[in-house]
Image (cartoon, rainbow, N blue to C red):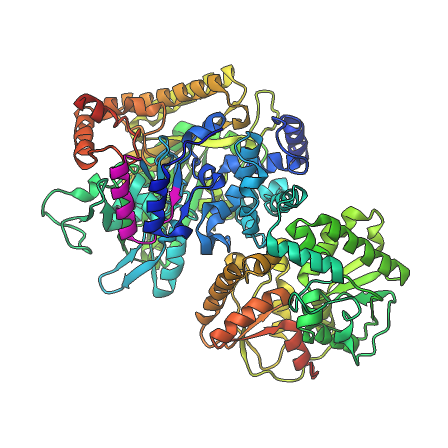
Amino acid sequence: MAVPTLDTAVVDELVAICGEENVLTGRSALFNRARVPAPFPLHRWEQFTPQAVVLPTSTEQVSAVVKLANRARVPVVPRAGATGLSDGAVPIRHGILVDVKRMDKILEIDVDDRTVTVQPGINMMKLSQRLQPLGFIYPDDPASYPCSLVGGRIGTSGFSLISGRFGHTRDLVISFEIVLPTGDVIRVGDGGGRKIRKSSSGYQLKHLFMGHQGTLGIVTEATLELVTRPEAEFSAFFSYPSYLDAWRATGEFARSGLATLAGVVLFDEQKVAYLRRDDEAWIPAPDWVKSITAVAMYGQKDEVRAGAKQIMRIAKANGSTYAGDEVSQGDWWSRHDRYATPLHGRTRSGQAVLMSWHCEDAAINHSQLPAVREKWHWIVDDLRRRFDTFDDWGMFSYTNGAFRPGGDYLTEIDVGIWEQRYDEEMWAAWVDAKREIARVAIEHGGSMSSCHGSCREGEVDLLPLELGGGFDVMKKVKRVLDPNNVMNPGKYLLDQAYEEEA
Amino acid sequence: MSAEDVRKGREQATNGDGDGNLPVGIDEWRDAAYNCFSSGHKFCREVCPVMQVTHDERHSPTAFHANVVAMEKGHLDIEDVAEDYVHCTMCGACELRCPNTLFTGDFYRFRQRTIGVVRAMRKLAVDRGIHQPNWKRWAERTDQWGNEPVLGWNIETSDAKVRDWAVGLDLPTGGETVIFADCEAAFKRPSIPRAVALLLQAGGIEFGLMSQQWCCGGPMFETGYHDIAHKMVEHNILDWRRNGTKRIICPDPHDYITIIEHYPELDENFDEFEVVLALDLIADLIRDGKVTLTNEIDSTVTYHDPCRLNKRLGKWQAPREILRAIPGLKFVDVDHVTQWSYCSGAGSNLFVEKPELTAKISRRRIDKVKELDGVDTLVSACPWSERPLTEQGEAQGLEVYDIFELVAEAAGFEV
């Protein structure tokens, strides 16, 4: 199938800007930059390919490419790790894809003022490997820690699993340089100082450019927090006879007020059943165990030791049964996240099939979790009744608040999808289900995304419902900053900003 | 439901379910590719030695699988992707780092197979007449001379000369046990097979040379020239049978893995042979006191885990044991899991087609050594890795030894 080709004069100019080795127009270069791990209509792959890929190595090159795109009226789509679970990096209007992976340098490590300045193409695991010998880490810790890149973390305003102690991406990025949709380059932070964490000077622009899904520019440099490497980790898994017991205990852990508390994770009954499905080795728990919590703490030895005792007391007082050292110690992160493989998929008859893992996320207050849970499972069960290509893989909730966790939760429902069987009917049913999942979150006073972004087909329809008048402000901001609508067009319903003008 | 049931179920569910667009040879990788595509995590990217230097998603293990899915959907053809598949050293890091392997592999005994996909694509390219110029020339020379042209395009590496490294060692031809010296070591770094031979003799192991040794065929399997590879395999097996050979000792990990993985596929009676990695054998000899290391070596070394041993076969303990047995030697170990992301860049003939990439990858490996306090020598156990590592080591003032050269010296031999 034909991919629309870009004017050769534009390609020539891209080569002049970035160099021949950094401009790609071959079919494999384009098809391999169409998709992210978010649900993807595999049967319409060619609708999402860029027309050219550039791999710039400097801010100046990025700026020149964006200016060219404005002159030629060609869409520009930024792409970092392409590990997002929303469609930010998917070129839905084709155009020039700006892949920042060759901008992966550490520019400065400032031990005195505790900052590290990097280019956007660096991965957090790689960065922390460099920082560890100096006694520091960069604790932005998503499930995609080994593969997502700093630029994408800013573009999605990412969620960190250990944010209760260390904060999320928005808390860990102090300032950054961004190429605006017109090609102008600015730096945003709290005020103007590159390494200043708090300022009352001017508008707080850092937040505006945090989580824009590539619609407001391309980040080319970021100054990040250097965090002292914790001496100690405490992780514990606890078992419960029901979801509601585990839910109540989760609330009590989160209310402990312990500064070392990095996160509490709540596994619901369907999730535990799913993990038990054929992986008895993973949860060697008796049948009465229906729901599970995990608690993680980080800090200096003295504070973690004392905090751990407090957690064990809270656990006991709230009917928790410690799952044992073998399950609790070591790599709690991979243990709780090992569900995300296609090998666990099942049809209704129990037939094993290869299914893609997709998780729908939302931010939900603690009080609303049980009600939201029931509705979400109903939506996915209904999908499964109608199509034997979907599978309910259960739910997780993670403490969502930075530094003061427990009031609200990143909540996910994991859905297995047999994507090899996608057709229009199945895709439409999936999009409807996503929209309904998002609607439940909003109706319960939540946000339809805590970490992935909400610009995907389906839930994006509800953005005006969630944001109200804020959505009108979004459109005005977009129009002002991107007069030609070249920066990642078609996302977040922002084309409406230009339709209203006409 | 047992793991076995799950495996059977998956096969039943997905076999014959394709769109029928995949060429023969690629079709068998349909589900392996979809396993990666549907997972989509890309944990492999930051450990892939090639991706670490090209940063181009076309060269990622994810793309290598996604291309199969795209071919099935009719979006890509082998012409579109053949050159992309050059960008792989077949080190196996991606397979280990894949969440499918890492998080469920223990239960399902499952390993994501990227190397198999790369091998199949390279074969398809050659079968369709799409050649990489230097790989083609390399294959033609190998076919012509019987061994790889490791000394340059115009210096013949024929079977008449493949035994030259053993001059003066008084080794018989044939016999129950033979040593299989790989092309690179036999012609370019003969000190390695000489060291192995001297240590085996010291340990009381009787062995001979093949009467007419050809290349193991591994690089031909790896670069897509399977017809030539099959000739090599048939020839070598015939040589062993004619000489009554039952046991083959391989100093080179590449030969070892080729023989244990490919030879049984082509010869149904191959289980009459025992294939032994020299590293394991010499570790045994040292452990059993049959080879004694008495000469002190005043050096601070670190060890490079050859990819085929560490990442492909899980063999990382024996060389560490050997190095710790050398008197006087200070050994600064880097964990074998950390080394999943290390590579010399030499594997699967990348250095023949893309020497500039091999140089970048090996430079990064040497940079890692330079970060270690006081280390003056890098020790490897793979002749192929030692070519680029030695070049880059020289540029940065670092010595590169083969582990057998070092052990022979400690045992009092001059090689």
Q: Is residue B341 left or right of residue B14?
A: left
Position in image of residue A373 (x %, y %): 38, 24
User: Can residue A341 be spotted in the picture?
Assistant: no
In depth, the one of A70 and A201 nearer the eye is A70
**Residue located 68% across and 78% down the image:** B408
In depth, the one of A90 and A451 nearer the eye is A90
Read off the magenta span: A53-74
Magenta-colored stretch includes residue A136 = no
Where B33 falls versus B249 (above or below)?
above
The residue most toward the top is: A386
Q: Is residue B287 left or right of residue A402?
A: right
User: Can residue B285 be spotted in the picture?
Assistant: yes
Position in image of residue A152 (x %, y %): 34, 43
**Residue located 40% across and 41% down the image:** A82
In depth, the one of A290 and B259 nearer the eye is B259
**Residue located 75% across and 62% down the image:** B145
What is the quadrant of residue B200 in the picture? bottom right
Magenta-colored stretch includes residue A69 = yes
Where B354 falls versus A184 (above or below)?
below
Position in image of residue B293 (x %, y %): 68, 80
In depth, the one of A454 and A227 nearer the eye is A454
Secondary structure character of the magenta stretch overall: helix
